[in-house]
Image (cartoon, rainbow, N blue to C red):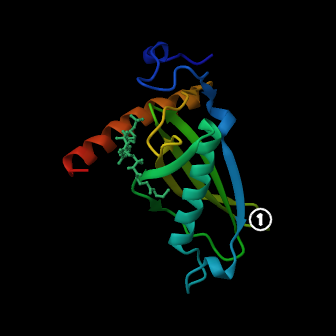
Amino acid sequence: MPAEPSEAAEPDPGAGRHLAPKPMSASRLTTVNLVFPGDTNPRGTIFGGRVLQWIDMIGAMAAQTHCRQVVVTVSMDAVEFRAPIHLGEYAILTATVNRAWRSSMEVQVTVEAEHPLSGERVTSVEAFLTFVALGPDGRSAPVRAVQPETEAEWARYEAAQQRRAARLAFKSEHGG
Ligand SMILES: CC(C)(COP(=O)(O)OP(=O)(O)OC[C@H]1O[C@@H](n2cnc3c(N)ncnc32)[C@H](O)[C@@H]1OP(=O)(O)O)[C@@H](O)C(=O)NCCC(=O)NCCS
């Protein structure tokens, strides 16, 4: 049984308290894309813009699965492309909603490259995105909280709070 952090007893401020929290695992999504020639650059490895599109798409789907409302992307943290994905390999994307606040949600997307014959996998990209739920009036709307259930999920949940603070500090500093 993982130790629950002290703030577990305190609901995230402003979160959709009238809605039951949803387990982190309930909105985790995975998609697999076979890398085609149209997805690659002239060197035969994946085009970065294509990966960003896939990341944004699965991230939005995970956020919508969590809150069951329309969402928009409000930010994407710096993305590092650690390893190429080659033509004919599988790009495996996994999205997890790490935490939700009042109307925003942090989604972590991991992209792995799998060789179709050997099955060898390497992590290619990891990205953190923030999505905001919109109400029928087009304004940001409250969402339900995320409920971590394992030690690893609690670690994600805690780290998300620190990243959010850094994001909002950056936004404030740069006049956003
Ligand atoms: C997303 C949007 C509706 C937010 O509008 P807003 O008036 O700033 O709304 P709020 O100030 O209430 O902020 C909403 C939430 O976003 C968060 N947020 C705003 N900017 C952020 C940023 N750069 N990074 C992380 N979170 C951010 C706020 O902290 C707030 O979170 P909370 O409600 O969980 O506390 C507006 O910025 C927008 O429409 N942006 C364009 C979205 C878009 O077109 N995306 C691309 C296509 S999907």
| Nearer the observer, 40 or 118 | 40
Task: Classify residue 86 by image quadrant.
Answer: bottom right
| Nearer the observer, 89 or 27 | 27
Q: Across the whole image, how many numbered discs are drawn on residues?
A: 1
Residue drawn at (26%, 41%) of the image: 169
On-image quarter of the N terminus: top right
64 in relation to 143, above or below = below
Disc 1 marks which amino acid?
Ser
Q: Residue 174's spot in the image, x, y percent?
A: 21, 52
Reading the image, the residue beneath label 1 is 118
Ligand 1's quadrant is top left
Please state if 99 lies on the left or on the right of 165 as rendered. right
Q: Residue 106's spot in the image, x, y percent?
A: 48, 41
Q: For mark 1, does the 10 Å Cα neighbourhood hold few (<14), some (14 to 19), or many (20 or more) residues? A: few
What is the residue that sits farthest to the front in this orientation?
137
Residue drawn at (40%, 32%) of the image: 161
What is the residue that sits farthest to the right in this orientation?
117
Residue drawn at (53%, 46%) of the image: 108
In the structure shown, which secondary structural element does the residue marked by tag 1 occupy?
loop
Q: Residue 57's spot in the image, x, y percent?
A: 59, 57
Please state if 49 lies on the left or on the right of 27 as rendered. left
70 in relation to 47, above or below = above
Q: Residue 87's spot in the image, x, y percent?
A: 67, 77
